Amino acid sequence: MSDRFQAVMPVAPRPEVVFVAGEGSWLIDEAGKRYLDFVQGWAVNALGHGHPSLIRALQEQVPRLINASPAFYNEPMLKLAGMLVDHSAFDHVFFANTGAEANEGAIKLARKWGALNRDGAHKLITFAHGFHGRTLATMSASGKPGWEGLFEPKVPGFVKVPYNDIDAVETAIDDDTVAVMLEPIQGEAGVIPADPVFVRDLRTLTAERELLLILDEVQTGMGRTGDLFAYQGFGVEPDIMTLGKGIGGGVPLAALLAKEAVSCFDPGDQGGTYGGNPLACAAGCAVLETVLQPGFLASVRATGSYLQHRLDQLSYSHGLGDVRGRGLLLGLDTTDRDAPALAKRAFERGLLINAPRSDTLRFMPALTVSLAEIDQMAECLDEILEEGV
Ligand code: PLP
């Protein structure tokens, strides 16, 4: 490894490339090489790189106020909280900086609600292969294979059951259970969508048993699936939802949203130095205003269908498996083709795609990706598959 990379803690196997600029669906490295970006910071840059609305919002906010303190209100915080409440089923918003932090908040809120309303019930049912973040509690909530022995002892009180299995959830419920928490699409697991019938059954079951339903929409929220929030596509309302990634368009921002009936934090229960800071919230307002513009979500659905169609064609011509997911969060089953090796070859050729599993490629381009860029991605992947990695 070259000396210039030595000071950065090696928590990820990074290629020795330094990125210096981004434009829409393109990332540019210091040698001037352009990469077609279908990763977008792991579904973070919802509007792509350098979207004019996001740049304008940040440029206007920087000279006005970057941080007032989480102990004070500020204008972008109020505006973004108001917009999120107006466009969702929730009444209160807590702002955080990362998806994991928002999920920690959701776990704490559920436990506080259990302490107040359910005689101290505190256990959460979560799902095999689920991913909720890398803090100790969210790692404990996650069902990522390989994490079982890490950083023990984990936070107790998480019971894992198979995804899309309502009987397993019912069997796992006991007097200490307070909530069920899931991703609408398990992204890290390889883009595995929740069955809509399962989600509706889960809503009925949790309501009957006085349990909270928590949806982790860190990856699926903010238009990624073609609905503003994925829960809207299921026709059910959770009690708590978390957002991250796309909400800040690349600026660190996350949120915990709750219905009034379960919003039981008292002052001092939850907080954080940067929570609700004006700069990040100004970014969030710009993203949400853009996503809410007439036609934006319809265009995500249309480009999502086109991406699905191009991936179906690749699957057909190369004898691959299913295309899974919704909107612009799609996974391609590569069957016996080594997905990480395909992603590595794609990187060398200037295409960024992700392989969350040995047999799955994940596609999470900017919500503003063009049909021509989808064609370019598909042609590049076609050539790589043809070469036979
Ligand atoms: N929840 C889900 C569903 C995610 O996909 C992720 C990140 O990939 C997280 C939580 C954690 O978010 P962050 O990395 O911002 O802490």
Image (tube, rainbow, N blue to C red):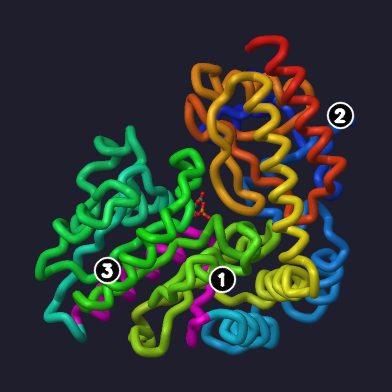
Magenta region: which residues? 89-115
Please name the amino acid that badge 2 sits on.
Lys
Some atom of ligand 1 lies within 8 Å of the CB belonging to the residue at label 3? no
Q: Nearer the viewer, mark 1 or mark 3?
A: 3
Q: CA distance from mark 1 to mark 2?
A: 35 Å
Q: CA distance from mark 1 to mark 3?
A: 28 Å
Some atom of ligand 1 lies within 8 Å of the CB belonging to the residue at label 1? no
Pointer 2: what residue? 33
Q: Quadrant of the C terminus?
A: top right
Q: Earlier in the sequence, mark 3 or mark 2?
A: 2
Q: Which mark is residue 136?
A: none
- Residue at horizontal 31 percent and vertical 45 percent from the top: 128
How many labels sit on residues?
Answer: 3
Pointer 1: what residue? 274
- Residue at horizontal 45 percent and vertical 70 percent from the top: 241
Q: CA distance from mark 3 to mark 2?
A: 48 Å
Circle 3 SS class: strand
Pointer 3: what residue? 179
Q: Give the residue furthest to the top.
A: 388
* The image quarter in which residue 172 lies: bottom left
Q: Quadrant of the N terminus?
A: top right
Percent position of residue 70, x then y: 54, 80
Q: Is residue 33 left or right of residue 96?
A: right
Q: Earlier in the sequence, mark 1 or mark 2?
A: 2
- Residue at horizontal 70 percent and vertical 50 percent from the top: 304
Please name the amino acid that badge 1 sits on.
Tyr
Instruction: Identify the main secondary structure in magenta.
Output: helix
Please name the amino acid that badge 3 sits on.
Ala
Crowdedness near tag 1: few (<14), some (14–19) or many (≥20) residues, C-alpha within 10 Å:
some
Q: Is residue 387 visible?
A: yes
